[in-house]
Amino acid sequence: MKIHIKNGRLIDPGNNLDVRADLFIAAGKVAAVGRAPAGFNANRVIDAAGLVVCPGLIDLAARLREPGYEYKATLESEMLAAAAGGVTSLACPPDTEPVLDEPGLVEMLKHRAKTLNLAHVYPVGALTVRLAGEQLTEMAELRDAGCVGFSHADVPLQDNQVLWRALQYAATFGFRVWLRPQDGYLAKDGVAHDGEVATRLGLAGIPAFAETIAIATIVETMRATGARVHLCRLSTRDGVDMVRAAKRDGLPISCDIGIHHAHLSEMDLGYFDSHCHLQPPLRSARDRDALREGLKDGTIDALCSDHTPVDEDSKLLPFAESEVGATGLELLLPLTLKWALEMKIPLVQALARITKEPARILGVDAGHLSEGHNADVCVFDAEHYGKVSVAALKSQGKNTPFLGIELPGKVCYTLLQGQVVYEAGNG
Amino acid sequence: MRNPQLNDKGELQHLLTIEGLPRETLTHILDTATSFVGVTAREVKKVPLLRGKSVFNLFFENSTRTRTTFEIAAKRLSADVINLNIAVSSHTKGETLLDTVDNLSAMHADMFVVRHAESGAPHLIAGHVASHLHVVNAGDGRHAHPTQGLLDLYTIRHYKKDFTRLSVAIVGDILHSRVARSLIHALTVMGTPDVRVIGPMTLIPAGAEKLGVKVFYDLKQGLRDVDVVVMLRLQSERMRGALLPSAQEFFKYYGLTPERLALAKPDAIVMHPGPLNRGVEIDSAVADGSHAVILSQVTFGIAVRMAVMSILAGN
C-alpha cells in the first residue's frame, strides 16, 4: 500500500519542521518527505489542502479498562476512540483488574491490542505486586513482556522504604519509574482542592502541599538512587517550581499534566459537577496558570489525556461518591490546540508536547516523520471548531466537563504504520 | 451558570442553599414566617395551603429533630407527610439514590425534604426530578442546611432587628458544619458587617476568609463585644483522627461559660442549633440562662419551614 498525502502543512516536531510538503508512504514507513521517490505510484492519494499533517499523537495515560472493567469500556471501544482522536501510541497505567503485575497479563494485553491494530499500546507495569506497596514486581520480566516503565498508578505508595528499594532496583536496570506525586495520608478522604471552593461546597479537601511533599520525597530518593523518574499529572504551581529546580540540578526527571488541568480550575466544580471529580483535583486558577506556563517553557514535558472512561451511573452520584476521571482520548488534540491558541504558541512547539516529548519518555521510536521510520500520521483540520457531544464521542465513556463546549481541531485521517485506521465522515 | 434553585421565571423552585439567593428572597421568607408564628400559637394550628400535597421526608442520615420539625410544619400546612429513613449509603449494593427518588416520584410526591450525609446530594436530586417537584435541603454533608440558616436569621432579626449593625460570632467546629456555612451566607447577604468564626485551626476550613468572615483562634478575643453568639454542636461522630485531643480540652478553651459570655455585649443572645452537648461546647449555666434563645429557635424553626414549603408550593 502506497499513500501520497499531498498539499498539506507538514508539522513534524521531531525534526523541527513546519513546511508545506507532501508525504509519501510505502510499506508502512515514511518513504519520503517533499519529493516523491523515483517510481512512486500511489495506491491512494489523500488531499490535505488546508490540513495539518503531523506524527500520530502519543498519549502517556489512557485507561483502556481491560482487563477487569469491561462494563466501563473495552479495548476495542477505546482504541477506536484513540484512532478517532489521532492517537497512534498510548501508554496504559497498571490499575486494571487484575493489576498489570505479571508478564502473562502484559503479553495478553499487547496481543489483544495487536490484533485490533488501531494503535500501539505500551503497558506501564505495576511497581509493586497488586499495587499493594509491599513486594516489588518482576520488573525485568515485565520489561521483556513489553512494559515501558513502572508505576503505582493513582494508588498511594505510603512506605518510603519500599519507594527507596523500588527506585534502587529500577535504577539497576535503567528503568524509568512513573510516579504520581501525592502524599496518601494528606490526601486521605479528600475529593477536591483544599481551598475556597471545597470550603464553600463542603467537600473534603486535598491540600496543595500533599503534592509538593511527595515531590520532595521523590526528588531526594532520586538523588540517593540515581533512578530516572517521570512524574505523572502535576497539579500545583509549587510542584512545577520544584520540578524546574530539579531539572536545573540535572536530575533525570520528567513530568506531564492532564489536559483538564491545563484548562480548568476548582471554580469549574460549579454546583457539584461530578465530571470535574478528577485526580489530582482541579486546583486554583493560579495553579492552572502555572501549569500552562510550565508546559510552554518545557518544565512540563508532555500533555496527556489521562483518559478514564466512567459509566454514567458511576457519575450520577453525590460528588464525593462519584467515580473519579474523565474521558479524554478524543479531546487530547482539541485541548492541546486550545492551549496553544490561547498561549500564542507555534503549532510545532505545541504538538511536541503530544508527539516528540512523550515518545522520548516512553523510549520508543515514534513522534517524528523521518524517512524509513513508521508512518504513524495524524491529519487534522486546525481551523475547524466542533461541539463536544455524547453522540460524537467514540469512547464508551461520555464523561467530560467539556460536553457542549466548542473546541478547535478535527481529526480527518489517522494512519498507523501506513494504514488508514480512521477517516472522518463529512461534516 | 444558572442557579439550580430557580425556575425559568427566576422564582424559587428548590431550596438547596442560601448562597446565591438575593436579600429580597430571604426577607420574603422571614416575613412569611412571621405570619405563621401566629398560626402555631392558635388553638387550631392548621392552614390549608398544602392540602392535597404529598411531602416526602427523605432522610438518608438519621435525625429525629429536624425530621420532626419538617413533619410538623408540613402537617400544619395540611399536607400529607410520608417519612422515610433510608440510612444506608449508595456505596452499599442496591438501589441508587436516583432510583429511590424515581420510585417515590412515581408515587406522586410533590415535595422532597432531603437529608444526606454527602454534600451536594440535594443538588443531584433537584437536577433529576420532574419540573413540578420541589426539593428542600434538610442538611447535606458539610455543605448547607438552609432552613436552619433561615431560622437562625429569623431569631436574630426577632431579637436584634437590624442586621447592618451586628457582630455575630460562630463558635466551634466550622469545618464540618453545614449550619455555619448557611448562617454565614445568610448573614452576609443581609449586610451583617462583622461575622466571626472561632475555633482551633483544625476545625476552620481552608480559605474561610473568602466566605466573608474574620477568623479567630482565641475564644476570648473573638467574643469581645459581639451581639450574637452561635455555639455549634461538636459532632463527635464526624471527628476523624487527629482533629482534637479531647472534648474536655475543647471545653476548656472553646466552651461557652458565663465568664466568657460576659465579654460579649450585655444584651447578647446565645444560640445553638441543638442538640446540646452540655459541658462540651456550652455550660449549663449559659444554656439555661437569660441570654439563651435556643428554645425560641425551635419554635421559629417550624414557622420558617412552613414559610419555605408554602412559598415553594406556590411557585
Image (tube, coloured by chain):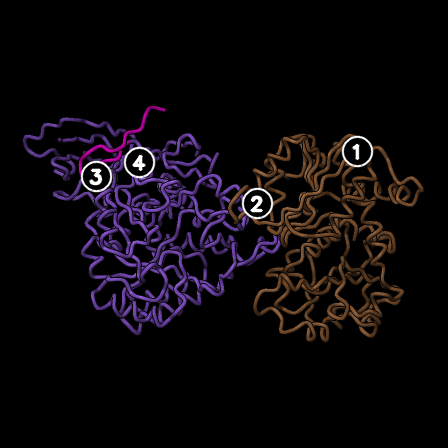
Q: Amino acid at mark 4?
A: Leu
Q: Which residue is mark 1?
A: B50
| Residue found at the far right of this picture | B43
Same subunit, tags 1 and 2: no
Which quarter of the figure is the C terminus of chain A placed in?
top left
Residue at which label 4 appears: A80
Discs 2 and 4 share one subunit = yes
Q: Position of residue A292 (x, y in %)?
A: 42, 52
Report, in whole angstroms, how far the alpha carbon at label 1 lies from the one at label 2.
33 Å
Q: Residue furthest top?
A: A426
The mark closer to the camera, 3 or 2, is 3
Q: CA distance from mark 3 to mark 2?
A: 43 Å
Q: Nearer the viewer, residue A20 or B266?
A: B266
Q: Is residue B190 left or right of residue A60?
A: right
In this figure, which residue is indicated by the disc labeled 2?
A270
Amino acid, disc 1: Leu
Seen in the picture, residue A415 relative to B23 is either above or below; the reply is above
Specify few, some or many for label 2: CA neighbours under 10 Å numbering under 14, 14-19, or 20 or more: some
Tag 2 secondary structure: loop
Dots 3, 1 in contact, CB < 8 A: no
In terms of secondary structure, where does tag 3 sit? helix
Can residue A368 be seen at all in this image of the molecule?
Answer: yes
**Which of the numbered marks, if any, corresponds to residue A115?**
3
Q: Position of residue A364 (x, y in %)?
A: 21, 51
- Counting from the top left corner in percent of width and height, residue A212 is at 44, 65
Direction from residue B58 to residue B288 in the image, left or right: right
Q: Quadrant of residue A80?
A: top left
Is residue A148 shown above or below B313? below
User: Which residues are drawn in magenta?
Assistant: A413-427
Residue type, numbered disc 3:
Thr
Q: Which chain is the one coloured brown? A: B
